Amino acid sequence: MNFNDLPPALRASFLPPPRLLMGPGPITCDPRVLRAMSYQLVGQFDPAMTDCMNQTMALYRGVFRTENRWTFMVDSTARGGIEACLVSLLEPGDRVLVPIMGRFGQLLTEIAERCGAEVHTIAVPWGEVCDPAQVAEALDRVRPKLLATVQGDTSTTMCQPLDELGRLCRERDVLFYCDCTASIVGNAFETDAWGLDAVSAGLQKCLGGPSGIAPVTLSDRAAAVIQARRHVERGIRAADDEDAGGERIRSNYFDLAMIMDYWSEARLNHHTEATSMLYGARECARIALEEGIDEVVERHRIAGNALAAGLAALGLALFGDQAHRMHNVVGVYIPEGVDGEAVRGRMLADFGIEIGTSFGPLHGVIWRIGTMGYNARRDTVLTTLACLEQCLRCEGFAAPPGEAVAAALGAFS
Amino acid sequence: MNFNDLPPALRASFLPPPRLLMGPGPITCDPRVLRAMSYQLVGQFDPAMTDCMNQTMALYRGVFRTENRWTFMVDSTARGGIEACLVSLLEPGDRVLVPIMGRFGQLLTEIAERCGAEVHTIAVPWGEVCDPAQVAEALDRVRPKLLATVQGDTSTTMCQPLDELGRLCRERDVLFYCDCTASIVGNAFETDAWGLDAVSAGLQKCLGGPSGIAPVTLSDRAAAVIQARRHVERGIRAADDEDAGGERIRSNYFDLAMIMDYWSEARLNHHTEATSMLYGARECARIALEEGIDEVVERHRIAGNALAAGLAALGLALFGDQAHRMHNVVGVYIPEGVDGEAVRGRMLADFGIEIGTSFGPLHGVIWRIGTMGYNARRDTVLTTLACLEQCLRCEGFAAPPGEAVAAALGAFS
């Protein structure tokens, strides 16, 4: 391969076009996070690096609302954080109960099956959330080791209430896991107060960062389950290192016992920490705590409500149980006779604004429009509504002029 | 948690101290890579994003010296790239042969065992490489599905010759995998010419980027083995999607068949691509190809030889078979009576230079000093030698004044 023979686009550095990302995530990054990620690296065991790791642990305790010692990062996208929790907690044959309200509940079943777990599910129609009584009945019937849930399932925009589920799990000595990637800091989330044992997240939604690292927190009882499977790798094993005796975790990369050794004072080498992503994760948490978690959630609530009001004023029907809608993403029916992809294409090509399509049974039925993280703002909501009105009109839908922006302005004031 | 009550270090953004990273990796990033990673995100299926993904595939074909269609990224550190290859290629009960010459060969056995494979090993003392005749004998005895190797094992600084092994594998219809994380573009590497079927890497060594994404390439026959295990996830499955019928891959996150669907024209959603890491990976490859792969390898060879000459002139003994040393990292014995950690501590605290410690049997025995990627330069080598001379003297070792820098200057000229 001769460099000078390559097409110009390959020879040049990549310069992304300007976009306003108003889909279900990833969203436009907070510029402070991008700045943090542009800083030079330090070594893996440099005191400055281990300080940065410890600070990041402390800051995410604030984000997750927990006192958990074991609050740290997994170096993968949010999906890998889910797998790390499930493969480290579940042994082959363990029973797990998964309430499914959308695509990401189904993902939990896919991952748990590959851990060798015996997976039981309860399901509600897309656009609804699970009733705690339904979960209680299933817990009593299945008697699982773990209840695995999703708080905000972006596929349907629904936000599952969790506080009652935590109580049900504690009463039955069931471990309680939640994937809060899409919802954290956009909606109230209380690890300790709600009795959660394992939680995983990502940066690319309301935290305002890029995908690529997964914050995780574990209760002491979850940590004990995982550490009973602890194993020190050959090649760094000292003469007095002994395995804990439990069944070895099926993944080396997602072995949380090893990752905990890396994030502990022992600093046993595992992977090489993704330093730039760590810098970004630290800054995401710092920014959220500086604003105040309650204040960030409220900002998302206000922006989401204004967006929903504007979409309704355009004459569009909102999708799903609005009492349980996530603050940070609104599902809206594509109106009859309108080509949904043509509207999305115009939004992107003519206005540089991305809104989301949908998965599975909702594909071609609804759009998903997000107001998340850095983009949970008045100007982004108003601009999106103004441009969507124009695109709908171009595609033959009689959008009432000015109503959407007026309704959103009203909601904001 | 009240933000204003937090310690000042937590309230502030993280500002890394200036460091010259001359260990076994990660190393100081090329500033062009940090700039690329500071650019704003685009959406996951934006044409600009899929263009960027396709360009990155093309650029890594140049890095890996391959025509392989399936040349793409896994969103994890290099260790996750290894696991993705092994868990996708190996089914429980499959036999795998691993030649071990250091810690990272042992890592391959750890990962392959957790895939449920039947792992066979051959080993050489740390500081040597495997003889192809020894591998041929073991291939005939074990008759494995896969030969899993490491090219450059930084734990020992050795670089395993691979061209002969590829021929041995083809003759026996054995799949041939290599982890070239630590060696790629610092040492010659030829995916196609050497008959490799699966290769994984990382950015944080000679490619001059941060850890956090793993470039992978697969031959058509490796891709066929993996695609025979293809499965489409519930939640995005269309009515006419059928599983390929092979045993399901044990990991969802590292399921290369799914990741290939995401990187193909089908663009089936899997994880959310780690966009900033992708930008960084693309720029790493672009920079290497712009300089020319042969030229980058030669720059590493010259810098490594100069470093080795300087260390020898200091009166230090080099570790391992120098005929098979990686270009980009030199192992050197800590001299008798000198506290190795005190020297490393002085280098970091007084000069801002990091040199490496070692693992396992070499811990406390050798230092490892790297000249990699952006840091494979004359000024970095000379500065490191000058400062090491000072630190050795402070720790009571009679380092000959000026000899190290003179020897390195001689090697460069």
Image (cartoon, coloured by chain):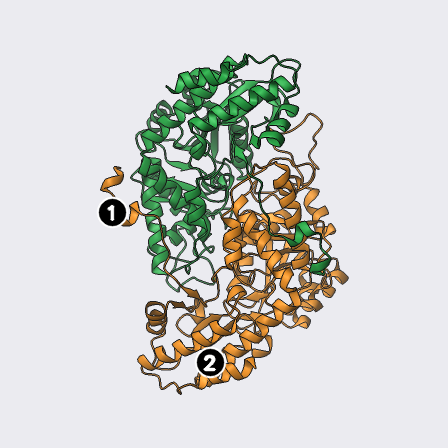
Chain colours: A orange, B green
The amino acid type found where label 2 is placed reads Leu
Name the quadrant of the N terminus of chain A: top left
Residue B175 shows in this picture: yes
CA–CA distance between discs 1 and 2? 43 Å
Residue B131 shows in this picture: no
Packing grade of label 1 (10 A; few <14, some 14-19, many >=20) is few
The amino acid type found where label 1 is placed reads Pro
Q: Residue at 56% across / 22% down in the picture? A: B388
Query: In the picture, residue A152 is in which quadrant?
Result: bottom right
* Residue that numbered label 1 is attached to: A7
Q: Identify the residue at the far front of this view.
A: B402
Name the quadrant of the C terminus of chain A: bottom right
Q: Chain of mark 1?
A: A
Residue B214, percent from left and from top: 45, 42
Please tell me whether mark 2 sits on a helix, a strand or a loop: helix
Q: Are marks 1 and 2 in contact (CB under 8 Å)?
A: no
* Along the line of sight, the residue nearer the viewer: A204 or A405: A405
* Along the line of sight, the residue nearer the viewer: B199 or B375: B375
* Along the line of sight, the residue nearer the viewer: B258 or A60: A60
* Along the line of sight, the residue nearer the viewer: B94 or A108: A108
* Residue that numbered label 2 is attached to: A311
